[in-house]
Every structure is written in C-alpha cells, then in structure tokens.
C-alpha cells in the first residue's frame, strides 16, 4: 500500500488500517498513531464531497514525509475523492515511529497543516447538490488561481 492513497467515495477504514498494520508491524516501530476523520451530521448536510489537486498534494505530502524521515518516522495518509455520506470516513492519517512522543507530536502537526494547506476542496451536499464550503475553507498559500 502506498504512503499516500486516494480513493473514490468513503474510505474503508478497517481495510486501510489493517493493510498499513500488516505492512509496518515488523519494521520495529513502537508507535502507530492514527487520526480518522468522519463526516458529521450538521447544518442539514447529506454528506461532503471533495476535489483534490493531486500534483500539489503530492508535493505537500512528500515534504512532510521528508520531515518525518529526519525523526525516523513514517507518515501515511488516505483521503476520499468525490462524495462521502454522513458517518463515513473521508480522511485517515497515521504516523509510525520508534518512540511515541515523536508520533504524537507529528500526527498533531500533520493534521493541523493538512487542514490549512492541503489542496483539497470541500463541498457540502445538500438537496443532492454540491455547495462549496467557503466558511470552512482556507486559501492555500501562494495558490494563485487555485485559491
């Protein structure tokens, strides 16, 4: 399984987690910290929908992976493209490292930076229509036309 994986629709959390676990369980990592994002029932939405600009996402993720490697850690991420209904997962991030303190610090910083800088545009699904979630979005640094 790749360190960064994109999937159409909701994520199969168990399959992704189990795949990661199988791949990394024998690599002498003492900590495996995960974060799973689940679509909440709020503001009358039926779900969320996501557009992703993959070239920038890959560059952003590669920079984080390089940062993690300097701490002998690995970052894993899976994200949905397209529609994700309520109570399903759209985002999973994980950090593996020999020491828990490294993994705990990295997962927090990674998820916060993801929310601020990853080139993923979120839409509410209401009445079967995609409505850009402008009030919960942040402009990407130096994004130009992609902002």
Image (spheres, rainbow, N blue to C red):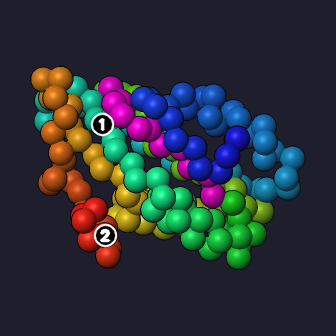
Rendered view: 129 above or below 76: above
Q: Dot 1: what SS? A: strand
- The reply to whether the magenta stretch includes residue 76 is yes
Using the rendered view, name the quadrant where residue 63 is placed. bottom right
Residue mark closest to the camera, 2 vs 1: 2
Q: Is residue 4 among the parts visible in the rendering?
A: yes
Image position, residue 108 (x, y; %): 49, 63
The residue wearing badge 2 is 143
Q: In x, y percent, where is residue 142?
A: 32, 76
Residue closer to the observer: 104 or 110 = 110
Residue at the farthest front position: 145
Q: Residue at x 62, y 73 (%)?
A: 67
Horizontal arrangement in the rendering, residue 17 relative to residue 45 (left or right)? right
Query: Which x, y percent locates residue 28?
Result: 85, 55
Q: Is residue 143 above or below residue 85?
A: below
Q: Is residue 108 visible?
A: no
**Quarter assignment of residue 141:** bottom left
Region rendered in magenta: 75-85
* Residue pictured at 52% horizontal, 41% vertical: 6
Q: How many marks?
A: 2
> Along the horizontal axis of the image, is 30 left or right of 124?
right
- Which residue is identified by label 1? 49
Point out the tag, 2 or 1, that comes first from the N-terminus. Answer: 1
């Amino acid at each position: 399984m790749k360190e960064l994986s994109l999937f159409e629709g909701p994520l199969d959390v168990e399959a992704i987690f189990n795949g990661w676990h199988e791949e990394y369980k024998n690599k002498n990592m003492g900590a495996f910290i995960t974060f799973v994002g689940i679509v909440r029932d709020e503001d009358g939405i039926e779900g969320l929908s996501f557009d992703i600009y993959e070239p920038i996402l890959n560059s952003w993720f590669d920079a984080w992976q390089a940062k993690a490697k300097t701490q002998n850690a690995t970052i894993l991420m899976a994200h949905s493209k397209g529609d994700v209904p309520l109570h399903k997962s759209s985002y999973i991030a994980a950090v593996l490292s020999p020491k828990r303190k490294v993994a705990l610090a990295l997962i927090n910083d990674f998820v916060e930076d993801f929310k601020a800088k990853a080139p993923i545009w979120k839409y509410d699904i209401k009445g079967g229509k995609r409505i850009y979630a402008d009030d919960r979005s942040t402009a990407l640094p130096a994004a130009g036309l992609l902002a």
